[in-house]
Image: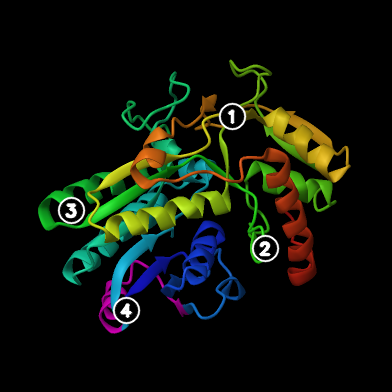
Amino acid sequence: MTVLVTGGAGYIGGHMTLGLVDAGEKVVVLDNLSTGFAWAVQPPAELVVGDFGDSALVARLIREKGVDAIAHFAAKIVVPESLSDPLGYYDNNTAKALSLIRCAVEGGVRRFIFSSTAAVYGETSAEPVAEDALLKPISPYGRSKLMVEWMLQDASRAYGLKYVALRYFNVAGADPQGRLGQSTPNATHLIKRGVQTALGRFPSMDVYGEDYPTRDGTCVRDYIQVTDLIDAHLAALAYLRTGGDSLTCNCGYGHGATVKEVIEVVKRVSGVDFKVNYAPRRAGDPAAIVAKAERVREALGWRPRRDDLDAIVRQALDWERRLHNRLGPPGPA
């Protein structure tokens, strides 16, 4: 049995590849390396450079590699970019996912794990937000992901494809063994940008909006450590292999931190008091979104083990130092 991991040379997909390899699984990674890195795919996982929307390639891999499960991570993920290039997001995140799901159905793959997002909820007054909350995404990114959830629901009913859709909140940190972390030089993740600024990669960092209806005026997010998140994926794979029915789960810790609070943690952990600039709100950013995450615990037996924001920031900081030594300094933002 082989697990096909799309986007498995990227941040979260790369950690999934590590987790599967650590568990003794046979893994094939399909990644076009537009944001991922070939060196992130560690043996014995096999890297195939290509696009997950290439149906002939995907069909061949399913057939030749004996794929019994697909873990789908390949996607565009930048909310502001999705507002300026919505069709690009619908093409990559939705249309190509349709092709991938069709290949799974036609190739006899019966297990599918989907990397979804809390952005499907949009601006919500619920805190924490449960899986049965109103789905009203406010960005093309969120809508492109919700459409894939709908396609999986319909494919499950019509063809017997069983899936687990995991709605991530804010993923952060790095592999505790130091093998992998967030490696895209100009990633927009708050903790990534914070530790880059602390290390002098950027002269300052921007905070978008300080007039939100939150405890300090900045956005509140639920930060989940990346290896904890991957443990939920491995639990989802085990659940599907033992006959579990299709399922959608939030993945978060159930409590949030504001942007200002995260920055203070970065400053404390790094020992650097860097400059912070305040700018107007960005379109598509909800004020607060925190997971109600009982379902993933009850259905998948998942238990978080790394819920420590200081440790998450320290992992990101340590990885950024390693990454700098590997790749050299990044270009301008």
Q: CA distance from mark 1 to mark 4?
A: 40 Å
Question: Badge 2: how crowded within 10 Å, few (<14), some, or many (20+)?
Answer: few
From the viewer's perspective, tell me whether residue 106 is left or right of residue 54: left
Which tag, 3 or 4, sits closer to the chain's start? 4
Secondary structure at numbered mark 1: loop
Q: Which residues are magenta?
A: 47-64
Numbered badge on residue 177: 2
Which tag, 4 or 2, sits closer to the chain's start? 4
**Residue 35 appears in which quarter of the rendering?**
bottom right
Q: CA distance from mark 4 to mark 2?
A: 30 Å
Numbered badge on residue 155: 3
What's the amino acid at mark 3?
Ala
**Residue 240 appears in which quarter of the rendering?**
bottom left
Q: Position of residue 132 (x, y in %)?
A: 31, 29
Q: Is residue 134 positioned above or below 240 on the image? A: above
Q: Is residue 269 magenta?
A: no
Which of discs 1 and 2 lies nearer the camera? The answer is 2
Which tag, 1 or 4, sits closer to the chain's start? 4
Secondary structure at numbered mark 3: helix
Residue that appears at 38% across and 57% down = 92
Disc 4 target residue: 61
